[in-house]
Image (cartoon, grey):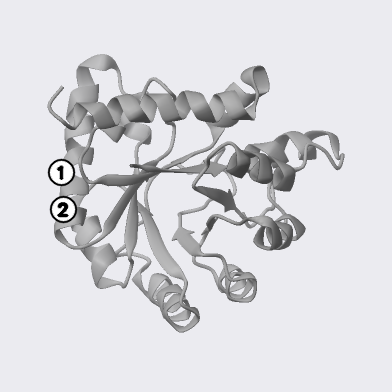
Amino acid sequence: MIRLHVNIDHVATLRNARGTAYPDPVLAAELAELAGADGITCHLREDRRHIRDGDLDRLRASVSTLLNLEMAATEEMTAIAARVHPDCITLVPERREERTTEGGLDVAGTRAAIERVAAMCARERIKLSLFIGPEPAAVAASRDLGAAQVELHTGDYCHAAPPDRASELARLAAAAERGAELGLEVAAGHGLTRHHVVEIAALPAIVELNIGHALIADALLLGLERAIAGFREAIDRGLGRRGGD
């Protein structure tokens, strides 16, 4: 089985576009859990463009599966995470100018900041995951910094033209295998649609997928329950290929 974590950020994006109290990302999280999500992911950004502090507090009180907080490795976010106590923290790079996360962490270049968050996670017994590019060196560095999990950035694979997609998939497979060899849990996410997710789910080392934008987009037309079921069906097809399909 592959864990499916639903990112509810863009429910908040839609709410914030009109300055209303709806749609409520916390209600969306509750409905996602009822529909079979294994966890809920949210990203508290510096500019609060979607999820807000109050949302995070309510999510912590509401989520009964697993709450994964994506955040930058800043002092502000570290203090918030220590107070709210999510089940998992995923460190991601963040720039105000970007529409969405553009790549994986520079693990070597941000080592000191990651070490500070890792120390807090160890003290508070919070699982630490690092969102990284599919590079074996970044995987090894993540383990050395105390991460229990890496989440591989799948954006290059999803956006690649068909001739280049095979090489991007091979990069992901090699990084995932390296993570498993080092005793890390290996997750994947970014840009995944029902069409892309099959080949990612077929990689033997992948144990978790974090999916937001495409799933919420499907939910706008199909409803959240059917959208989650559609991704589950695609993931199951990928799992079926692990047997040598």
Q: Is residue 72 left or right of residue 142?
A: right
- Report which residue position mark 2 lands on: 178
Which quarter of the rendered picture does the C terminus lie within? top left
Residue furthest right as drawn? 20
Q: Is residue 38 left or right of residue 226?
A: left
Identify the residue shown where x is 24% and y is 23%.
165
Q: Is residue 105 left or right of residue 238?
A: right
Image height of 14 relative to 222, above or below: below
- Report which residue position mark 1 lands on: 174
Identify the residue shown where x is 20% and y is 47%.
175
Identify the residue shown where x is 69% and y is 40%.
28
Pick whichever, 243 or 129, lies toward us: 243
Residue 1 quadrant: top left
Q: Is residue 129 visible?
A: yes
In three-dimensional space, the C-alpha distance between marks 2 and 1, rounded to whole angstroms, equals: 6 Å
Q: Position of residue 190 (x, y in %)?
A: 43, 38
